[in-house]
Image (cartoon, coloured by chain):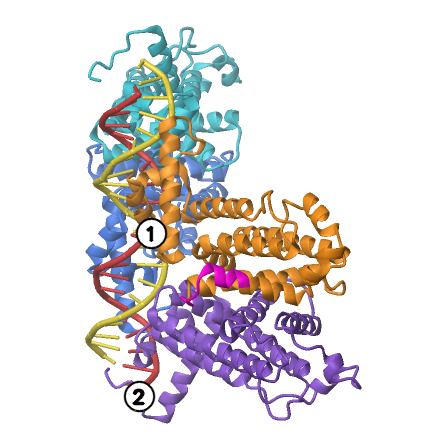
Chain colours: A purple, B orange, C blue, D cyan, E red, F yellow
Amino acid sequence: MIVRSVRTERGRKTRAALLAAGRQAFEETPYDAVRIDDVCTRAGVSHGTFYTYFDSKEELFGEVAAAVVGEMFAASVVGPGVPGDPHARIEAANRLYLRAWSANSRLVRMLEQAATAEQSFAALLLDLREVFVRRGAEGLRRLQEQGLADPSLDPRLTAIMLGGMVEHFAHVWLDLGEHTDEQTAVTLLTRLWAGAIGLTPPSTTTQSTPAPSSAAATAAEEGP
Amino acid sequence: MIVRSVRTERGRKTRAALLAAGRQAFEETPYDAVRIDDVCTRAGVSHGTFYTYFDSKEELFGEVAAAVVGEMFAASVVGPGVPGDPHARIEAANRLYLRAWSANSRLVRMLEQAATAEQSFAALLLDLREVFVRRGAEGLRRLQEQGLADPSLDPRLTAIMLGGMVEHFAHVWLDLGEHTDEQTAVTLLTRLWAGAIGLTPPSTTTQSTPAPSSAAATAAEEGP
Amino acid sequence: MIVRSVRTERGRKTRAALLAAGRQAFEETPYDAVRIDDVCTRAGVSHGTFYTYFDSKEELFGEVAAAVVGEMFAASVVGPGVPGDPHARIEAANRLYLRAWSANSRLVRMLEQAATAEQSFAALLLDLREVFVRRGAEGLRRLQEQGLADPSLDPRLTAIMLGGMVEHFAHVWLDLGEHTDEQTAVTLLTRLWAGAIGLTPPSTTTQSTPAPSSAAATAAEEGP
Amino acid sequence: MIVRSVRTERGRKTRAALLAAGRQAFEETPYDAVRIDDVCTRAGVSHGTFYTYFDSKEELFGEVAAAVVGEMFAASVVGPGVPGDPHARIEAANRLYLRAWSANSRLVRMLEQAATAEQSFAALLLDLREVFVRRGAEGLRRLQEQGLADPSLDPRLTAIMLGGMVEHFAHVWLDLGEHTDEQTAVTLLTRLWAGAIGLTPPSTTTQSTPAPSSAAATAAEEGP
DNA sequence: TATGAATGAGTATTCATTCAT
DNA sequence: GATGAATGAATACTCATTCAT
């Protein structure tokens, strides 16, 4: 079976079922504990059928991971209508960041795990991280240019560190069970982030608006 | 072999060899890929001998992990002779923090992985994290009391987030190959940390306040 | 492979081959010495295939034993056309009894052995024994009602003892190599059995009593 | 260690401890499940020590079995003062027979099991059985000579069958949990035995004694 | 395409036995 | 003699993958 491309409607459905079943399985079960039989059972197909569509568990996981990463890319995009207030924009970005990582926490962990064994997964992971890093660095650079953030900070390294703070918190919060609510977490992450980059206090910028977060409600288009 | 307690010098050496070999193996190989026979070969004993000292791979890993966690506890203690300057003390703490996690990055990742499957490992991991969180929260609280840090920050949550930033950076830096040198990393982490908590710049503060140095004297063994 | 039900003809054949091979192996080899690989080799399948149909050696043995017990149940039924003469009927029953136990002597011994370790086997064994005990007790009770046997004998206990005599003799005869021929054995067992229950000699009784033959008609399918 | 004969007092004690521990273990545990380590633990010696006294588990079991068989030989001897009444003498013999087999039921079963694998054990078992068979055949022959039992019965085969009845009942009674008390069992076994060999009813012999069993109370010296 | 039976490499684990101390 | 650490042969079992139907 060399031609893996699906030809018929029926085949497309089977493939989709296997992918969905695989994603479910990888979310619930540690990587090595995921059995192809489990996936097939969930998908309602026989074991032999799996190999019509995938060469191995690795290939299946690769596709699942790529799909997840694609979703995270999409989710990370701050939509149009972002307020001008930098603080509100950072908050909006942090909320998206936290949600994106929270939604796929298990699978990202698994991807990290798989990355230690397979080069291709490591590359996928780096790609994923790079998107967030670039976005963060870009936002910081813009603030620096506007004279709103400490200009001596290295944008890339700073974005890695502060982005890592958010990403890591998503893990601690969801996987390790640290108790807090999203609003509290986002607010604090944003304050720390703002303080860390020396963001000129909103008091100067938004003198008349005591509630930056209310402005954030209609926010977005791009990260900080 | 029900009695697992080692009775002779020879036995103690063999056990130590197995532990050392296990640690090596767990550092180099993904958890599920570690074979008991690999460990035995490294330790220079037959595989039957393994079961004289451990019941399973899990038990071996448990001991290895406990040892690593113990080392990290020890390494996280900021020793005496630290300068009284809060900024310098944060930097010292961050350096220790980064080194502690860097040195055992692989094993901690593995512990996280193992924690998803075994409750006991999850508990060990929480203990480990808690020590660092407490230390961080305590340091922040002291600075707040001294009027040197933003008093409105929740100490625990802030410590989790900023500690996570350091911990996560250790991972990105070492495991994912982000290029930078330790000094640059520590300096930046410290600046971000200090900015995040609103640490009053030393130059301004230290002049008129004799407090920091005297306070530092009684806090010499604790991080920020 | 959770679904153990066989779906195809091929599967049914393989399963049957494993059962047959297992029965052979258990007949030739002490229980603990039976290797799953031996069974697979006899059945001409790889050892992986074994686990498609059975979870363990115990499960295989359970099915083999159940089959044997089923056969013994069937073989113990004294068919129609048995003479009405009680003595002749006891003889017929003893012959069947002896043959049934002789044919499966090894497997029954093995079942006894297995029963010391596994509760389910003990239950199977008790069931098997109970069938023969009931049949014997029932036959005796009928003879007692007809005034042909000592009415003071406890039917159940007597059946256990005399049945045990036959069962045990099958073992001594076949497994321990006591030399004699079946006819001699059956004749003697029958004389002892008849004497033990005080069976009224047929010559004396049958003449004036039309009962035995009529009674035999309704007891044609039951042993003594 | 070629010389296995024990030289010192200490050695004799250790050996005895191992034998006792082995007997206990073999009584409680199926043959293959008996671990040499168990035996050593019970005996309070280290594993290595076992091999100072025995070559293998088989050798140990051989000695244990020989000791048990020796005891059963001894126990089977009906002591002096046996009453002349044949019925009482049969009862006394049956009681001894039942007790001897009951006391060592588990070990005899194990010996049977071991006999299927090792020739030497089979021989030991045959020896044991032979003693009881001889004794039974001899008793029957005597009764036949005295005109008290059916002279047409083959003494050896009859003794095997009736002896088997007792032996087998001991097993069913003790190992399989058939409920009854010893007195009931012995009385019934004796009645069946007596009836089976056509023993001339006591009424002829002990006219004035309506309670044969009371005479049996002071019985014994030899079997029937 | 789908099925599910067959395969066998790979791994953990047990335990009798040996041997240095 | 006694100890207990070391050995490794023997075996059960799993599961990804192949293949005939």
Mark 1 → mark 2, Cα distance in angstroms? 37 Å
Whole-percent x, y for residue D52 in the image: 28, 19
Whole-percent x, y for residue D90 in the image: 40, 19
Q: Mark 2 lies on which chain?
A: A
Q: Left or right? Give the position of B144 relative to A73.
A: right
Which element is circle 1 on? loop
Which element is circle 2 on? loop
Q: Residue at x 33, y 21 (%)?
A: D49
B186 magenta-colored: yes
Q: Quadrant of the C terminus of chain C?
A: top left
**Mark 1 lies on residue:** B35
Above or below, comparing residue C176 to residue C57 in the picture: above
**Mark 2 lies on residue:** A5
Q: Quadrant of the N terminus of chain C?
A: bottom left
Q: Give the range drawn in magenta.
A: B177-187
Badge 2 amino acid: Ser
